[in-house]
Amino acid sequence: MTLLNTPTLDPKAAIRAARWKEFRSFSRRFLRNPLGVVGLVIVIVLIFVAAFAPWIATHDPYLPTLTARLAAPSAEWWFGADELGRDIFSRLVHGSRLTLLIVALVIVTSAPVGLIIGAVAGTRGGWIDAIFMRVTDVFLAIPKLLLALAFVAALGPGIVNAALAITLTAWPPYARLARAEALTVRNSDYVNAVRLAGASEFRIIFFHVIPMCLSSVIVRMTFDMAGIILTAAGLGFIGLGAQPPLPEWGAMISTGRKFIFDQWWVATVPGIAIFTVSLGFNLLGDALRDLLDPHLRQRN
Amino acid sequence: MITVDNLTVRFSGSTAVDGVSFEVAEGESFGLVGESGSGKSTILRTMVGLNRHWGGNIAINGMDARVTKQRDLARTVQMVFQDPYGSLHPRYTIGQQIAEPMIINKLADPVGRTAELLELIGLGAKFQFRFPHELSGGQRQRVAIARALSLSPRILLLDEPTSALDVSIQAEILNLLNRLRKELGLTFVIVSHDLAVISYMCERLMVMRNAREVETLTREQLRARDVQDAYSRELLAAS
Amino acid sequence: MTANLVEIENLKVSFRNDEGGWNEAVRGVSFSLGREKLGIVGESGSGKSLTGRSLLGVLPSYARISVDKLSFDGIDLKTASPKLRRSLRGGRMGMILQDPKYSLNPVMNVGQQIIEAIRIGDRKLSGADARRQALASLEAVHIRDPDRVMGLYPHELSGGMGQRVMIAMMVVREPDLLIADEPTSALDVTVRTQVLSIMDELVTRRGMGLIFISHDLNLVSKFCDRVIVMYAGHIVETLDAKNLHAAQHPYTQGLLARLPSIDGSLEPLPVLTREAAWLEAAP
């Protein structure tokens, strides 16, 4: 005997349909924000370029052509060539993969760790809260670049070590954010209702508190991506990130410094790329915050 | 069914409940009436286990509330909160929220029972897949009632169940509550600042003021204006 | 010929919905108000609050408003400059909201807020004079210890006290019109009567016009001279408060039907079944 009035729909599919409807309404509101759309387009282009880099690049990014050293932008070298005659456009395109890799590595590790630590601290309170937050304070106090230098001194330069260094200083803000949300949510009636049903603290934190922290965390993530790109470029600039011959954008600016006045394209083009991608993530983050932040929620 | 004996609750300096005692028989509907701050909501929250710091004795269906685990208490007494807009989790569907207590307690067939409950409160099974923000205040309060009933408790505690609703919706919810009480043989403890609502819903009631109990009356006494205390009389006059 | 204090003709307020279209929240509302007490009754979503806010000009920027005629004491509000509307607000038109917890500034004490309201009207007023006026306004709302209350912060006030402070703030500049949006819904029953009698006293004594917005028809009928009933964005019935029992529209009749009362029957309460036909405006 079917007790459901919709015999053709099973519960899981129906819940998926309900969530899809929510997502569609969310997208429609998002698309009404022109700057947000610009940001989203930039990010999509970045991902696309990174995914199809070998097909988009016109030359081999590692192959030096000594006859074309420091060539100006032309039909053959779209963005010119660097001091070893490598095509800057192709290096840019392949470098996007490194950019995305660093961003992904850092975000995927820092955000969940910060989120969980903050949510647990905020929901439990007491000495757990005190300990977690003091640990958070310690990591917040460490300057990113100094930590990276320390890491490199200890473990050697490279992308993974750079990403690790950035991660260690990137998670505390998420913990702070999550804790702030958790402090509000833990006393709400819907959490009390589920406590009344006998829910364990684990269930409350992971299924009830954390979903409410996600909005702020997602917004923070998009802003963070812009920051991570800049930090990674900074590390590359001082030679601590990706090592040559990897086409990391920061490293490209660094080598291009020497030629900035006569062959401006060597340093400027990767600089513009970093600027554009950072801007894209910032615009996307702004638009998401307008949509997701419960304090700012408005229908527009 | 319920025995509250000399209950005292203190929060960082101020006394929220001061030596209150009352009893509720099985199947009875008991009202707690008083102004904001009189302590009535605190009594409910303590009875249901949301507040664990109190003095005195509370016995619920023979269980000592002080030593009973939340899971066991949950199968006997549940609560419906005042604000329908805050008592449902914004991110889960109605069906998920009604089924959750059953899933936590490993009861059989949560999905079927959810559909049953939705029919029981007058909404229908198709509401399973809606989100709270798609529902009106009155509908949300019905869902809150369904969720409270999902573990088949014997006692329902209701904290100002209709205060946040429009006057035109109040009647529906009150009718629903009365019907459920009759059909399921429930025991109610209802908190309200509205004497008219309490008088309609409860056979016996207790007037509270400033954390203390003022007077305990029956509905008949109220109607006959057989009221002793001056404060109770004031409340009666204002209604 | 005495000009009506307020005249509204064919007011429409709409909001964007998720599909990109417009939802009309107020659909062609027209009424006029003299120096009397008018009640606007309806459930959540009927458009009653928006109507009050349109008059004051405090709708959110993402709302679209269209009206044939909107005038206050002969001044055409449709064509009035923002500066004029701002000067009317607070000076000649006041608004009291539902919950003083949210409508009073939490970081300023009561005295500072009332004095600020006074000062907006008269920038040249001395500190001492403004304080005297503020104390007088608190006394007018029957606050027994105005000196002490002046120093309190909003979170230290009880619901009834906070609402009286709100009324004092709005009335201190002697407006001609007071719009009260669910002023007693957040208050306990005993306090409700107090606050209503204060409002009644002020409105009658100073000859103000009052628009009382509420979802409680019984309450409004005891308090107001005339009542407008709204449903789904338009007016379904207008009547004098004393003729409420002769209401024609089934929705009004339904609203009147018994709420629980102490001496009332214990039978299931009569419930309002909404007809789809009520969604259409009456001709």
Image (cartoon, rainbow, N blue to C red):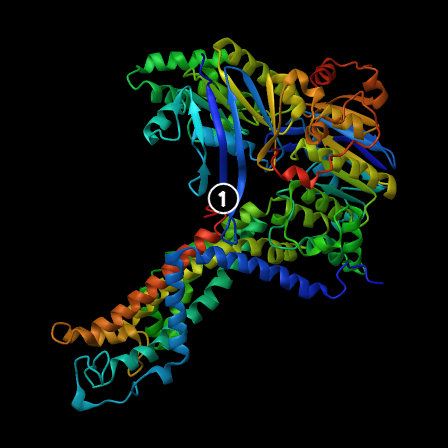
Q: Residue furthest front?
A: C283
- Residue A231 locus on image (x, y percent): 32, 66
Q: Residue at x 34, y 80 (%)?
A: A94
Q: Is residue A14 left or right of residue A103?
A: right
- The amino acid on which the numbered mark 1 sits, given as a three-letter code, is Phe
Say which residue appears at 80% left-offset and 56% top-offset.
B113
Picture coordinates of residue B80, whole percent (x, y): 72, 41
Q: Write down the residue under mark 1.
A: C15
C279 w.r.t. C220: above or below:
below
Q: Nearer the viewer, residue B217 or A32?
A: A32
SS class, disc 1: strand
Q: Is residue A261 visible?
A: yes
Expressed as whole percent of the image width and height from the top left, the position of residue A261 reads: 12, 72
- Depth check: C50 or B178 in front? C50
User: Which of the two residues, C20 or A217, is positioned nearer the viewer here?
Assistant: C20
C214 to A95, vertically: above or below: above
